Amino acid sequence: MSANLHSIQVARIIGDPTQPRKVFDQAGLDQLAESLRQDGLLQPISVRPHGEGYIVIAGERRLRAARQLGWEAIPALVHDDISMRSSRRLQVLENVVRRDLNPVEEARAYQGMMDEGHTMQEVASTVGLPVSQVSWRVQMLQALPQVLDLVAQGHMKPSLAHEMSKLSPAGQMVVLRKVQSDHLTYQECIWICERQRAGEQQTSMFGGSVAAPKVLSSGERRAAAGFMEAFEKASGAFETIFDLEQKRPGTLAAALAAELPVAEQHIREMQRFLGFLERSLHRERVEQRALGS
């Protein structure tokens, strides 16, 4: 894999939309731009041909900082014969070594390499980490989007998200609510995960056998998580309304008097939808019992 150094017009280079790093901190870019202004570019970026221009392999932060300074050209190593697979490998290696990725971006980078044909052992060798560490990072991606967002923002430890990823979407929501509403230590959060997992394992056991779980796509998991989140919000609203109606019957009707027909229609739609969900859950329960018998 050869590369030649060229000075390339910044306007001819685009970022790689598939590259692992998604978050670029503006304060960090400002510091890098100041460093480039004072000392110049100490290490050229890496690019590959793309149409009439080039696409970044490594060094997108340097490219963005150069743009910020108004540079017209930037030194770049041009890899003419690099494959997409090798390009992804270089991106992951540079970002991980420089610690430019948050834990979620890092995990997605490993998963991306594996999706392109790399084994987990090859990924681990590339970034110089134990296979077990790469494995648990990738496992963490089974956590709900809300959980991964907290990890990416630095509000939750990756190890806690990894434990939560072993739970069902509903179980993750139970733990997430407790974590966000209570002032818990890290170890207390881990204990809650362990208790929730033990409860789920016990529930799934019928007659000594375990019913095989359905394999859900990422889209289905997101939909389930969205439903649980919306259901929790709706439940809270219903409880508030119930309390108001208990204290002063007719409060809700009076509040919705101007939109009564619309409110009645929404209630009928909710009843139909909840009836459908109830029947669906009943079928799932029957199937689980049949598998366990």
Image: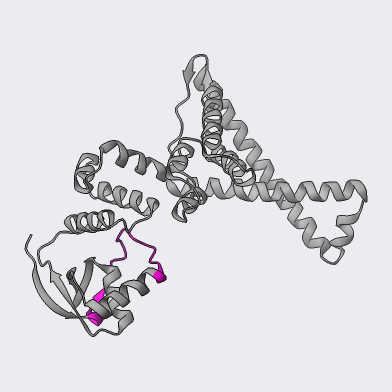
The residue shown at (87%, 63%) is 257
* Residue 171 appears left or right of 263: left
Is 283 on the left or on the right of 238, as rendered? Answer: left
* Range of residues picked out in magenta: 10-27
- Residue 97: percent from the left, percent from the top? 25, 54
Picture quarter with the N terminus: bottom left
Q: Position of residue 158 (x, y in %)?
A: 43, 45
Up-down relation of residue 280 to residue 88 (above or below): above
The x, y position of residue 42, in whole percent, is: 18, 71
Q: Is residue 19 magenta?
A: yes
Compare residues 178 and 187 and report the one nearer the observer.
Answer: 187
Q: Is residue 291 visible?
A: yes
**Count of numbered badges drawn on the protein:** 0
Q: Residue furthest front?
A: 38
Locate residue 283: give its quadrant.
top right
| 276 with respect to 144 (left or right) | right
- Quadrant hosting residue 203: top right
| Closer to us: 31 or 172 | 31
Residue 15 visible in image: no
Query: What colour scheme does the image use?
Result: one colour
102 drawn magenta? no
Q: Relative to 167, does residue 153 appear above or below in the rendering? A: below
The percent position of residue 122, horizontal first and vertical second, equals: 19, 43
